[in-house]
Amino acid sequence: MHKFVILIGPPGSGKTVCGQALADKIGWEFLDTDSAIEQRTGLTVAEIFQEYGELNFRQLESCLLEELAVTPVKLGCVLSTGGGLPVTPGNLPRLKELGPVILLQAEFSTLVQRVIKTKHRPLLASQSPGTPDAHMVDKVAERLATLIKQRQEIYNQADYKVDTSVKSPQLVADELIKFASGIENR
């Protein structure tokens, strides 16, 4: 029997940290699709984008979803997806077959502040070392706004939505537990 709770959303929405908090609270496995692909390929997501392109990375994501659909899980699994994974044609229906799809979202300014603190996002990464300057923040904000606009129609098809702007990962996990029927603390 497949038991998944799937987290989707834009970069910086907290999918990984909130997903791990949820998995810890309910005693389920946690799988981050980006980390799984990095582990399998021996390359970072940024390296895959740079060496093989975004299309190849999206194909790796789709293959991972196909494998998850036929691989039984012991107790259950909280699945944190890359921000673009559900947008690839066919992926959102696959996700919905696995379990409830939950959109994590946050205020735009919160997303920007979270994203500029990381260097591992190939579609948003800063090429400048050190503290982000106003130009870099504007550039990241512009790119993030474009990504969200392109993906919003897919994100809106989630079964449930949670705003993570001012909630700790533990509070988000508590809210998700209330939503996801059949999930119990173990």
Image (spheres, rainbow, N blue to C red):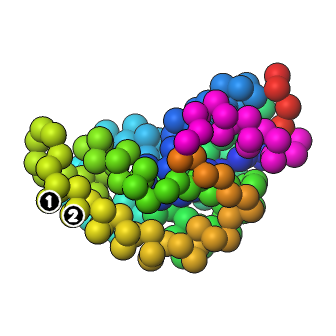
Quarter of the image where one finds residue 154 = bottom right
Quarter of the image where one finds residue 142 = bottom left
Rendered view: 119 above or below 64: above
**Amino acid type assigned to the residue bearing label 1 in the image:** His
Q: Is residue 33 left or right of residue 26?
A: left
**Residue 139, labelled with which disc?**
2
What residue appears at the point 59 percent right and 39 percent down from the top-left corner?
A: 167
Q: What residue is pinned by disc 1?
A: 135
**Label 2: which secondary element:** helix
**Label 1: which secondary element:** helix
Nearer to us in this view, 175 or 62: 175
The magenta stretch is 166-182
Quarter of the image that includes the N terminus: top right
What residue appears at the point 15 percent right and 40 percent down from the top-left corner?
A: 131
Percent position (x, y) of residue 23?
66, 31
Q: Is residue 132 left or right of residue 94?
A: left
Rendered view: 39 above or below 127: above
Nearer to us in this view, 97 or 158: 158
Nearer to us in this view, 49 or 115: 115
Residue 177, can we see it? yes
**Amino acid type assigned to the residue bearing label 2 in the image:** Lys
Mark 2 nearby-residue class (10 Å; few <14, some 14–19, many ≥20): some
Q: Is residue 7 left or right of residue 27?
A: left
Residue 73 is a magenta residue: no
Q: How many marks?
A: 2
Q: Are marks 1 and 2 in contact (CB under 8 Å)?
A: yes
What residue appears at the point 30 percent right and 67 percent down from the top-left corner?
A: 143
Predominant secondary structure, magenta span: helix
Percent position (x, y) of residue 162?
66, 52
- Between the residue at mark 1 and the residue at mark 2, the CA separation in whole angstroms equals 6 Å
Percent position (x, y) of residue 177?
78, 39
